[in-house]
Structures are given as structure tokens and as C-alpha cells.
Image (spheres, rainbow, N blue to C red):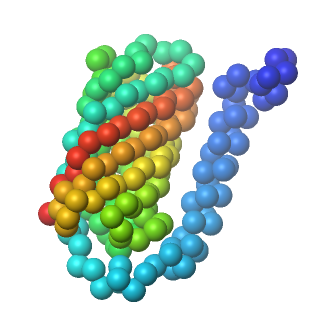
Amino acid sequence: MDKRFPLGKGGRMNRVFAFAAFAAFVALAPGTASAAMEDSWAEYDFERNYVSAQGVCVLPQGGGDMRRLGGGVVRYGYYAGDFLAVELSAFCTENEPGASLKGLWHWWGYEKTDPFFTFGAAGFAGGDAGPAVGVGMFRHFGDNWSLRLDSGFMMGLESRSEAVFSLACGIQYSF
């Protein structure tokens, strides 16, 4: 066994620990939402739907046919509450299109700079699929337009790539 990787390179235990950490985060996170809520957020009448277009860089790990290069992603989302949105994404790199269904949770409230977490599932046409988590940030320019930055991680379950990292940057329009 390699001492640098005590659980093995990309072994099943790494996946189990990653999933357990994600599940613990999801279970504990809702308790902090009420503490972060500001009076101004409760009174703000925000737009419920949004669309986004971004450039994306995909970084697959552990084999497979995916290439490390850029592509694009488009998203449609709907705010189901003040802090939680559901979004559907379609993305494409040079040789692998894919899609995801995620939740987007704001823990900070509405400010000019607005950080968020994402969680859900993602998959590629080549068979790589699994749970996906991420962090990101909006920089709002008024009520409708925003700059959106995302970083994500998809854990491949029974797929060719053990993990897929992604970085995305683009614009978002709320309506």
C-alpha cells in the first residue's frame, strides 16, 4: 500500500467517506439558515426563475475517455423558497455531453456578493454519473443580472472516471 494514499488511490473507502461527509453536511446545514437570515432578505421580492450561460473547464480524474478541456453549460432554475433553488443543467465538452439536477442553497442571504452551495446528481453521456456537490458565488449587478462562478465535484459511482472536477464562469439572468 502506498503511504501517501492510506485508503488506496480512488478506492471504495474514499467514495464512502466522501459520501458520508456530504450526507453529514446536508443534515447539519439547514440549522444555520435561520441564523443567517437578515430582515432585509425577508422583505425582498426577488425573481423566482433564472437562466444561466457559462464557460466550463472539466477536469476528470482516474481514467475514462473524458478530456480535460473546456465547454459550455446552460442552466434553468427556480427558487422554491428564500434560500433554496432547484436547477437543471445541460453541459457539453468536446466529446461528452451531460446533464445535472441540483439544489442551490444560499447560506448568506441576498447581498451584492452572494455565496452558495450546490448538491444533487450529474451524469455524462459516456456513462460517468454520480452525486455532485459544489460551491459558488454570485456577484449581482441589479435585480436581474449576475456574474456566476461555480466549482463542482462529481463522484463517479461504478463509472470510468472516479471523480470529475469542474470550474465555470458566466452570466445569469433572473426573471
Q: Is residue 124 above or below residue 53?
A: above
Which image quarter holds the C terminus? Answer: bottom left
Displayed quadrant of residue 170:
top left
The image shows residue 41 at horizontal and vertical percentages of: 35, 79
| Residue 76 can be seen, yes or no | no
Given residues 172 and 104, the one toward you in this image is: 172
- Residue for point 54% across, 29% down: 163
- Residue for point 54% across, 79% down: 35
Position of 39 with respect to 16 (left or right) is: left
| Residue 121 can be seen, yes or no | yes
Q: How many marks?
A: 0
Displayed quadrant of residue 19:
top right
The image shows residue 140 at horizontal and vertical percentages of: 27, 60
Position of 72 with respect to 39 (left or right) is: left
The image shows residue 121 at horizontal and vertical percentages of: 44, 44
- Residue for point 57% across, 60% down: 26
